[in-house]
Image (cartoon, coloured by chain):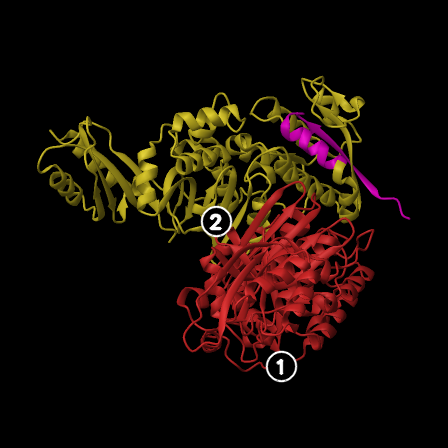
Chain colours: A red, B yellow
Amino acid sequence: MKKLKEIGVAVLGYGTVGAGVVETLLKNGDLLAERLGFRMVLKGVADVDVTTDRGVALDPSLLTTDGSALLSREDVDVVVELIGGTGVAKTFILQALEKGKPVVTANKKLLAEYGGELHRVADEHHTEILFEAAVGGGIPIIKALREGLCANHIESIYGILNGTCNYILTRMEEEKLPFEEVLLAAQNAGYAEAEPSLDIDGYDTAHKAAVLASLAYGQPIPLEKVTVRGIRGMSSLDIDYASEMEYRIKLLAILRGGADDIEVSVQPTLVAHNHPLAAVSGVFNAVQVQGDIVGTTLYYGRGAGRAATASAVVADMADAGLNLLAGGRRRDLSGVSAAKILPLREPGAVVARYYLRFSMLDHPGVLARVASVLGGHGIGIDSVIQKERAENMAYVPVIMVTDQAKEKDIADALRDIADMQNVTDQETVRYRIEDFK
Amino acid sequence: MKKLKEIGVAVLGYGTVGAGVVETLLKNGDLLAERLGFRMVLKGVADVDVTTDRGVALDPSLLTTDGSALLSREDVDVVVELIGGTGVAKTFILQALEKGKPVVTANKKLLAEYGGELHRVADEHHTEILFEAAVGGGIPIIKALREGLCANHIESIYGILNGTCNYILTRMEEEKLPFEEVLLAAQNAGYAEAEPSLDIDGYDTAHKAAVLASLAYGQPIPLEKVTVRGIRGMSSLDIDYASEMEYRIKLLAILRGGADDIEVSVQPTLVAHNHPLAAVSGVFNAVQVQGDIVGTTLYYGRGAGRAATASAVVADMADAGLNLLAGGRRRDLSGVSAAKILPLREPGAVVARYYLRFSMLDHPGVLARVASVLGGHGIGIDSVIQKERAENMAYVPVIMVTDQAKEKDIADALRDIADMQNVTDQETVRYRIEDFK
């Protein structure tokens, strides 16, 4: 029996995902060796905390607090960064790349903010940075986009990319619970962080959208120019009204490539209830990718969690190892290489249908005045639902679904309506409706 | 500007998919070169028919009837086989592999029947055979299974893999049409062949199941031992009754890996209407893959057609080219390499719930006698629907849903029931119900 080649691996960060990776290597190491033709050998695990029990049968002598020394060891071929954030994680990744060692990371924030720099350093040292686990947890969406669909211009990507938000929206809809109550339950169940802003304000989704966009369009995305709206404070009313009209509200990352610009945004969006994305519930993620050759494809799975994320990390480690054994990285280009850099589409220029919920004062003629302002801005109205005013409520809920309209026109019209006397003194709720066309 | 490297490509077979591949290279060749760092250069297209217009702006001087000469040319690095079948296609593939040239094919029949031999020859000549387009059309499911999920033991795969069957079942359900009428319409629309057996009798799905199984379990699958049932002659009655019980009938490829054996089968199966696979309609395909680490993932897209299939073929050509430029194939193992070969599970030993439709004679006590036979074979009954006997019909339709039962016990019970006097002289309809557990 011939002796298998070995690839030495260092894991930096022994948190949830780090422990999942170690566990996966222990559990399925033989299977991996059989499939890959080489063995991944864990040379060490670094963390500031090497005493907490992670529930994994790891040889304690492999633990170290010195990540820099570990990644520099000669017998370490592949470096896995699972620390997160943009501080020491970035330092370690740069150190590894500068030594010509491939890096596997799940760090979407770092990639979204410093992807260009990291890829440049990887290029300079003829090595690579792999990041399947950064988007969609265990779903091999990065590989699908970068490799499986490489023959396609990517026309659009729509993604449910944050399990916490999708869990909250699903429970709000199914159990008719208010946002705050579900958020608290999610925090208690460990599905949401004590400081939930990264998730519920849409930033985590935006980081992932930026990573997908950089792959789909071959250019870095300036995050500060991306429209990002989260689900914080969403009202159950809107979930109910949307449901009456056979829509579900999902926090979507929306990417659309045009001839002259790219649209990237994150926002709660109404999705027809019979669309596959509407069926994605709980902590699951899904990504719909439309290519000019392949048409519509969709990828679904667990978007987070120890095991699912570990599955993606280990797949990248396998690729990194195979590439090393074949003499180096296989794909030169790391998604920041478009011949022509396109600008982001101005948010105001984006065209879509909109769901508007007005809280109108109960005066005669108010509805007509609102409709007339919308008409004056060239906004057609597709349907109107006026609800009865509930007892002891000062406002009448009126839902309008618009025709296709420019976001700027909608915003201007809503500003004009807010300025009118005796119409409403409440903020009008506005969500995009996505027709996937 | 540095000159891009080139990879010479020969396309064998200029039918629907062949023309789609040529069209994709013409349309997106620049994008591919930008993404891959090399250019795929079409050196020739071979077909017995070089005169029919394929609607593609191919330089006519690239056409040839001599496939063997074309694939042997020194400037041809990658050979794409899109002829189909197990005759000349196999000869050409072996010729190419023996010259050490990687082969890209969409030929599931050839892979299912001769995969072991082809992979062996590829191994001997240190080259590879790539077959993303053989299963699921444009969906990158082979890459997901072979690379993206490589860290997982594959617990199960459930696939809707034949667009023709799914189109027929969808129209039968949505428009309440009989099988024969929809088949005829599908033939007229070009969705089904004039000789439809390969599709509607389940063989095409079985070929694809064998390809998936060989990847998931690393061993060839003896097709003759696989239970294959198609949808030919399916009655609208069963689609209606299933629908009443909130199920849809889908032609599923079912793969389940156990510790001691592997279950592989193809059969019309009842799927709960709220399961993602139930939502797959028309010519679309979907594959649900359950891994021990990643949990449940699902992949969805167009399972056939010129463009979608071409997307997968070109992705494989890209991989083959990248591998060649890196010195050769990257993954040694082509899915026929499990350390321990497992037997196929005996069909009779498979445990599932079943939908049974009896056409009972309208005599007192018949239902009780049938239930008692089932009970005698240890088969529990979950629910019973007895329909009124339609006027001028001799039979009363009775639908029974069983508890989990061995297939052999079901078959034995149905045989005993058929042998009874005054119960039924019609064949009992039987479909598996899949609970995805």
Q: Amino acid at mark 1?
A: Val
In this view, the residue farthest toward the front is: A364
Question: How crowded is the residue under tag 2: few (<14 C-alpha within 10 Å), some, or many (20+)?
Answer: many
Which chain is disc 1 placed on?
A
Query: To which residue does mark 2 refer?
Result: B288
- Above or below, B210 against A94 in this view is above
Which chain is disc 2 placed on?
B
The secondary element bearing badge 1 is classed as: loop
Question: Which residue is depicted at the point 47% across and 39% down?
Answer: B209
Return the x and y of residue A21 as percentages of the image width and height: 56, 66
Magenta range is B1-26
Query: To which residue does mark 1 refer?
Result: A48
Query: How much space separates mark 1 and mark 2, taking CA atoms?
Result: 39 Å
Return the x and y of residue A357 as percentages of the image width and height: 54, 66
User: Is label 1 in contact with label 2 (beta carbons under 8 Å)?
Assistant: no
* Residue A132 can be seen in this image: no
What is the tally of numbered marks visible in this picture?
Answer: 2
Which residue occupies the foreground of this view, B36 or A180? A180
Return the x and y of residue A49 as percentages of the image width and height: 59, 82
Verify whether residue B352 appears in magenta: no
- Above or below, B120 against B402 in this view is above
**Figure quadrant of the C terminus of chain B:** bottom left
Callouts 1 and 2 on one subunit: no
- Above or below, B126 against B404 in this view is above
Question: Which residue is depicted at the point 68% across and 36% down?
Answer: B102
